[in-house]
Image (cartoon, coloured by chain):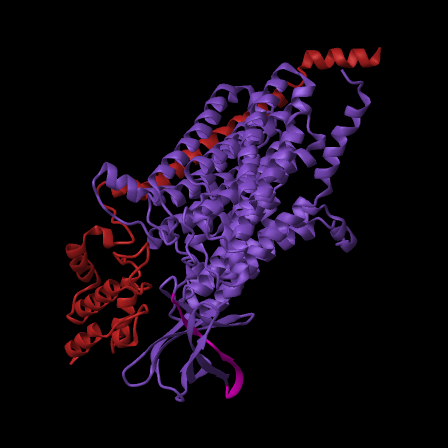
Amino acid sequence: MITELGHFALILAFLVAIVQSVVPLVGAAKRWPGWMSFAEPAAIIQFSLIAFSFGALVWAFVTSDFSLRVVVENSHSAKPMIYKISGTWGNHEGSMLLWVLIVSLFGAMAAFFGGGLPPTLKARVLAVQASIAVAFFAFIIFTSNPFDRLIVAPFDGRDLNPLLQDPGLAFHPPFLYLGYVGLSMAFSFAVAALIEGRVDAAWGRWVRPWTLAAWVFLTIGIALGSWWAYYELGWGGFWFWDPVENASFMPWLLAAALLHSAIVVEKRESLKSWTILLAIIAFGFSLIGTFIVRSGLLTSVHAFANDPERGVFILLILIFFMGGALTLFAARAQAMEAKGVFGMVSRESGLILNNILLAVSCFVVFVGTMWPMVAEMAFDRKLSVGAPFFNAAFTPFMVALGIALPVGAMLPWKRGKLGKTAYSLRYAFALSVALALLVWAMQTGRSALGPVGLFLGAWITFGAAIDLWSRTGRKGNLKRLLRLPGADWGKAVAHTGLGVTMFAIAGLTAWEVEDIRVAQPGQPFEVGQFTLTLEGVRNVDGPNYFSTMADVRVEQDGRYIRTLHPEKRDYPVARMPTTEAAIDYRFLRDLYVVIGDQQADGGWVMRTYIKPFANWIWAGCILMSLGGLLSLSDRRFRVAAGARKAPAGGVPAE
Amino acid sequence: MKRLILILALIASPLFAVQPDEVLDDPALEQRARDLSTGLRCLVCRNESIDESNAELARDLRLLLRERLVAGDTDEEAIAFIVDRYGEYVLLKPTTTGSNLMLWLAGPIMLLIAAAMGGNFLRKRSQVQAQAEKDSLSEAEEERLRQILED
């Protein structure tokens, strides 16, 4: 019964979205207030309906309703409750429902918080947002309906892919989708502004919070996914340059570029048409990401239920929205004349360099991701493009970005002097070089990667600190530091986060220690500064799996640290083995232990890694998102919204 | 003896990436093998190198690679040996020959185009500024202004 109601609500939401995508647009064109204000209640009703529908699907998973095809294919009655809930979006149909739920959520939020927007812009934004929802409602209802029933319900389900039975699934996809779909808001604002034919500083101020929010969610989502891979896949890799990872990374790079270029629109009324274009393309990459994941065109470790028909449908959605928006852009872009005037060396030019590096690095990732397909179709060459290519082709852009960042971030608006800014950063530079040289001397005979990473990380971090310090005035008034706007703090924290992550990735790659051996029970062995002893291996039964669990005693300098329990699990229903690494997380390093097969002589294969600074990778990501949140909390966003409201209230109604 | 170990190793059923019994005695040679195997694709996997993969085939490739290195092949010869048998699909880092040049040059060329466009935009903006400064009052206008102010 609840399932039928959910299905019905889904169809109703589809119909509401169709009306919402037409009526406010007509209203805005004809200046009919009634038609325009239709958008707000429609957005909220649409969200309520889809939320109910999603709730119904969660309910079907929780109660293990095996008359639903999705539940049978992705659940099992013995599965722990948390994975029954998160399993709702651990499959194609459910995840698409989550996707469209978030599209509506953003629409409803824009209706709710958009009090300060001019009525025509607001009506158009909500209408464009609804048209995106329409496309995905149609996709769900016509190609991948989660409420599809089976005529004969089986006794039990086929269980969820064991790799997905992890708390990671509960958080990774929702955050990622919040980010992907959050970019739809920037897209809607861009298209609405193009229809409106007006882009000004106020527009930049309205679109930036949404972009920031999307970027923060994407950062968290990507970091969670990478951490999940780190502890789940059994050898501690955190980034694979897999097509699906690239699909989430490309929108992240463009969102980062977009939120920087929107600053220029907001403060200097320049870079307008570029920012609009970026907003359109960033969402385009979200759609391309969805297309890559769902179509099965490229092979990836993220195996989703692939179906060519679905791929074609998403391709059509992509063509419709990108084609439409870019045509509109071509027709209207000239109307957006740049106003701001600035010199060759200025904050503006620094932000342009940032945009060039981010956009071109995104382009490199895109070309690398699509090349196997292009090469096969156009040149009849079957080849692979893997991590070594991306490491070689992508990293230089990030190094350049890291070197330029502290200088660009401190240049004054309009016109600056490179020498003057560089002079104020002299201590940061000297300290970073000294640190890098020190480490280089200590680690004789290894690659330069570690010291270079350390230099970049330290340079960005100290640069951010000096930038903040320079805001305290000449006497170093600390109270002033606390009163700085949220955006300034956000900038410093987010840049520091980037520095930390850059350093951590270089450090981990350069200084990792690996040990592979057959460990005999009771015989201690040394890995780096640690002494490990395999004390025993036992069989344990989990709720829906059997586990082979080892007890590994870890000592350092003869002192007991802890006992780790790496596992091998076998999921009988899904017929899949998984490895569960045991990790001793520490501030400066992780100890990562994996157990393998038993050998003929009674020993066990054991793999031990010492991973220096592993946690720092994700700590940096947390800092980046924290910086985004700080910037989002800046009162100037709210003041601006209120400032528009006040005069509007004083003008008599037409 | 090595041969025997290899044969024995092939019989054992693996579950993991690099197994202890695969590791070569010579650490320098083993390091070379590891470095090379991170650049070779496991053909039956989804985007994994043979160094990371648990698949049977990846193990065979790892052993084959080590066999070639032990036999005295240089890095290039060993890779060429494997590419000859499995095609360029096995290379995770595509070659820089033929149409692949487009892949490798796409980034740098795009960077040049973007830098040219960005530079051009900046130049225009800063010229507008110079113009704006020039647009300030001419001598006659200034004289007239002075007169008005004096009046």
Residue B48 at what x, y percent from top left? 32, 58
Residue B35 at what x, y percent from top left? 30, 64
Chain A's colour is: purple
Residue drawn at (18%, 70%) of the image: B67
Vertical placement of A567 versus B151: above or below?
A: below
Any part of residue A155 in sight: yes
Residue drawn at (38%, 48%) of the image: A305
The main secondary structure of the magenta stretch is strand
The answer to which quarter of the image holds residue B9 is: bottom left
Any part of residue A418 in sight: no
Chain B's colour is: red
The N terminus of chain B, quarter of image: bottom left
Q: Is residue A608 left or right of residue A268?
A: left
The answer to which quarter of the image holds residue A306 is: top left
The answer to which quarter of the image holds residue A537 is: bottom left
Residue drawn at (53%, 85%) of the image: A560
Q: Find the magenta span and give its range.
A: A557-572
Residue drawn at (19%, 66%) of the image: B64
Depth check, front residue: A197 or A552 = A552
Depth check, front residue: A124 or A141 = A141
Q: Is residue A106 left or right of residue B62?
A: right
Q: Is residue A87 left or right of residue A419?
A: left
